[in-house]
Amino acid sequence: MAELDVSQFKSHTEAAKHAGLAWTVHQSGKFTANRTRLIHSGNRYLKYYMVEAANSVRVHDPVFAEYYAKKKAEPKEFAEGRALALTARKLMRVVFYLLKTNRLYTPEVIRQRA
């Protein structure tokens, strides 16, 4: 991927934050907000393409379709958008692992790593 150089990041968490697939944290003392947004910083092109890819992958891959359906069924506000963002985050983990280890995609890789 031209937008993602995995050698810059130690983990998929850092790569996801770079892509803007992380949530803001609002807390004070013992209070932590439940309703937060995706961060506005990060590479907006990478975020867009990861979300679009996740939307396509969930249609064609049963592992991602099951994950999307599970997250969408959780009783949360903005269920579809949240489920798609979480699916994109899962796809980021898989892409990061594949690029880091220089492997090709197979469904077994997802079941092992993601």
Image (cartoon, grey):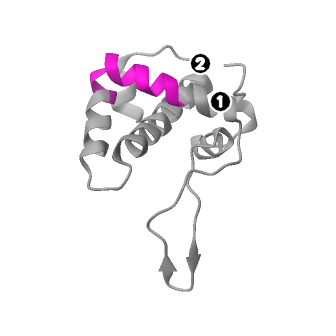
Residue 81 within the segment the image draws in magenta: no
Q: In which quarter of the image is the C terminus?
A: top left
**N-term-proximal mark, 2 vs 1:** 1
Labelled pair 2, 1 in contact (Cβ < 8 Å):
no
Q: Residue at x 71, y 36 (%)?
A: 43
Element on which disc 2 rests: loop
Tell me the mark number nearer the camera, choosing from 2 and 1. Answer: 1
Q: Label 2 neighbourhood size at 10 Å, few (<14), some (14-19), many (20+)?
A: few
Q: Which residue lies furthest to the bottom in this view?
A: 29
Q: How many labels does the image show?
A: 2
Which range of residues does the magenta coloring cover?
51-64
Left or right of 16 in this view: 51: left
Nearest the eye: 112 or 45: 45
Locate residue 66, reporting x and y percent. 26, 32
Residue 53 position within the rendered picture, expressed as x and y whole percent measured from the top left: 49, 22
Q: Is mark 1 on a helix, strand or loop?
A: helix
The residue shown at (38%, 27%) is 110
Residue 46: assigned label: 1
Name the image quarter holding residue 81: top left
Horizontal arrangement in the rendering, residue 39 relative to residue 88 (left or right): right
**Magenta-drawn stretch contains 63:** yes
Residue at figure coordinates x 51%, y 61% from the top left: 36
User: Does 105 appear above or below 14?
Assistant: above
**To which residue does mark 2 refer?**
102
Q: What residue type is labelled 2?
A: Asn
Q: Which residue is drawn at 73% across and 31% down?
A: 7
Expressed as whole percent of the image width and height from the top left, the position of residue 61 reads 32, 19
- Vertically, is 59 above or below 92? above
Q: Looking at the picture, how far across and down is residue 18, in whole percent?
A: 68, 41
Numbered badge on residue 75: none
